């Protein structure tokens, strides 16, 4: 009997076909009104956007129930505080390492030297960034229902942790609520599986739309900047994070990278860390063997505060724009870039395009022209997809390190190549088979 094709392989194939199909449309049909109206901005847009919405639909209820189960599973507030401190510290560390790596590579390669500005490229209007004090104040929701409605992840995490701690303090009532949360969490995981069943279709349309609009033509004038960002992202993902995993968690990075493939694919196709939370949770629990009590806490936190890939883009973009405009940056400016990139990642939504808003904050602090962001807009969507995959890798790496420190990771599952592999979602089919 031929082994069933895994969901990951199906999605990978759909991604490749969508990339090729979209690129062909960009080359041969970019001026055809019918194709652009009814295919690219019609079918591609509708199905792709609906798929992303389906992923986002899962995030708030899944994070809520998983986090309640996780906090109650830990059972001890002091242990919860220790895990939170470790996770937050590691996320800040990896973001800092990412931005310093990016600056080092960019300074050495010096992208943007002799660059001729593209006419009409400076069309970016940045959204005013809130003061840092407001970022910290807004962690505490004034209206938790409003936070849930808007999907404000940092406020949701704060409220749910507080609520779960109160559950622990309520004894029997809290235990009954926890049992209900565990049942609801199990149902939500089934909903995740149902959405994953149609993932190849959604990914195909997302990739087809992106490349039918962007193509590869926009990369050519920006090849220096684009290449430096990609190289820095790859070095951080396969070098820095793998080293941290091997040193602090004593785990094989090669196994880790292989098992992270489903999360990488979803992160790449959606360009949203938040939309990838359900898949990341499933991967770290089912494929990497991390206990739900730890994963349910660290993964949503990472999707909110960990922006390794975005920090790398900011570092390279800062050097690139400075070179383009002939502005010399000194050690103090580079230190400011490092500090601002770390601080800006806290409380910033894990959604597509947010890196440009963060970049505007950085530019203002070091005196670079914010309109220079318009130069990198053309390739930012493609880079956003890659850096989101790096963000998700950082989330899972820190989760594994924290889990190892708390002895909450099952090495047998981690080292088992078949653990957590999904072939097909068998909810209705399995039911029929059992009763036939």
Image (cartoon, grey):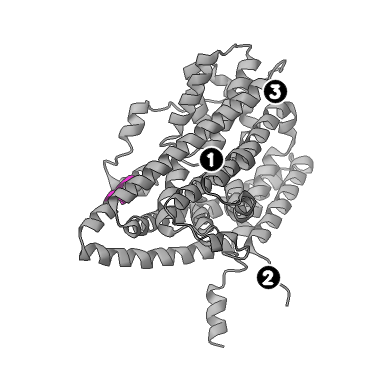
Residue behind mark 2: 4
Does the magenta-highlighted stretch encompass residue 160? yes
Left or right, residue 13 beside residue 265: right
Residue 7 in percent (x, y) is at 63, 62
| Residue at position x 61%, y 30% in the image | 377
Residue behind mark 1: 352
Q: Secondary structure at mark 3?
A: helix
| Residue at position x 42%, y 38% in the image | 89
Task: Name the image quarter holding residue 74.
Answer: bottom left
Q: Is residue 367 visible?
A: no
Q: Secondary structure at mark 1?
A: loop
Task: Please identify the dominant SS of the magenta region.
Answer: helix
Q: Secondary structure at mark 2?
A: loop
Marks 2 and 3 sit apart, C-alpha to C-alpha, by: 46 Å
Q: Is residue 98 visible?
A: yes
The outermost residue toward the right is 28
Residue behind mark 3: 109
Identify the image quadrant of the N terminus.
bottom right
Residue 22 in percent (x, y) is at 72, 47
Q: Is residue 93 above or below residue 24?
A: above
């Amino acid at each position: 009997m031929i082994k069933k094709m895994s969901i990951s392989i199906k999605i990978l194939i759909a991604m490749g076909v969508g990339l090729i199909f979209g690129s062909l449309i960009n080359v041969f049909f970019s001026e055809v009104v019918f194709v652009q109206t009814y295919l690219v901005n019609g079918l591609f847009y509708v199905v792709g956007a609906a798929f992303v919405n389906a992923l986002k639909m899962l995030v708030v209820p899944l994070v809520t129930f998983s986090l309640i189960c996780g906090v109650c599973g830990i059972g001890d507030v002091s242990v919860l505080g220790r895990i939170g401190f470790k996770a937050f510290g590691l996320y800040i560390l990896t973001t800092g390492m990412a931005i310093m790596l990016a600056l080092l590579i960019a300074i050495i390669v010096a992208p943007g030297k002799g660059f001729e500005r593209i006419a009409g490229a400076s069309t970016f209007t940045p959204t005013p960034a809130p003061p840092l004090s407001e970022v910290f104040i807004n962690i505490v929701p004034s209206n938790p229902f409003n936070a849930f409605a808007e999907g404000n992840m940092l406020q949701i995490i704060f409220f749910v942790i507080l609520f779960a701690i109160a559950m622990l303090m309520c004894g029997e009532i809290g235990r009954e609520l926890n049992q209900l949360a565990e049942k609801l969490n199990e149902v939500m995981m089934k909903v995740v599986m149902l959405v994953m069943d149609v993932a190849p279709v959604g990914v195909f349309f997302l990739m087809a739309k992106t490349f039918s609009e962007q193509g590869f033509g926009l990369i050519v004038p920006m090849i220096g900047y684009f290449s430096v960002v990609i190289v820095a992202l790859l070095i951080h993902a396969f070098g820095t994070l793998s080293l941290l995993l091997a040193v602090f968690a004593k785990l094989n990075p090669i196994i880790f990278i292989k098992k992270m493939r489903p999360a990488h694919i979803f992160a790449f196709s959606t360009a949203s860390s938040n939309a990838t939370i359900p898949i990341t949770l499933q991967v770290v629990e089912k494929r990497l063997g991390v206990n739900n009590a730890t994963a349910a806490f660290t993964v949503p936190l990472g999707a909110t505060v960990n922006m390794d890939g975005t920090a790398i883009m900011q570092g390279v973009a800062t050097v690139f724009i400075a070179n383009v405009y002939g502005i010399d940056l000194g050690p103090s400016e580079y230190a400011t870039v490092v500090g601002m990139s770390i601080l800006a990642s806290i409380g910033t939504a894990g959604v597509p395009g947010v890196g440009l808003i963060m970049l505007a904050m950085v530019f203002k602090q070091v005196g670079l022209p914010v309109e220079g962001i318009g130069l990198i807009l053309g390739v930012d969507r493609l880079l956003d997809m890659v850096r989101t995959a790096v963000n998700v890798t950082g989330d899972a790496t820190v989760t594994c390190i924290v889990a190892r420190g708390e002895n909450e990771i099952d090495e047998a599952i981690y080292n088992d190549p078949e653990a957590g592999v999904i072939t097909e979602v068998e909810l209705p089919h399995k039911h029929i088979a059992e009763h036939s």
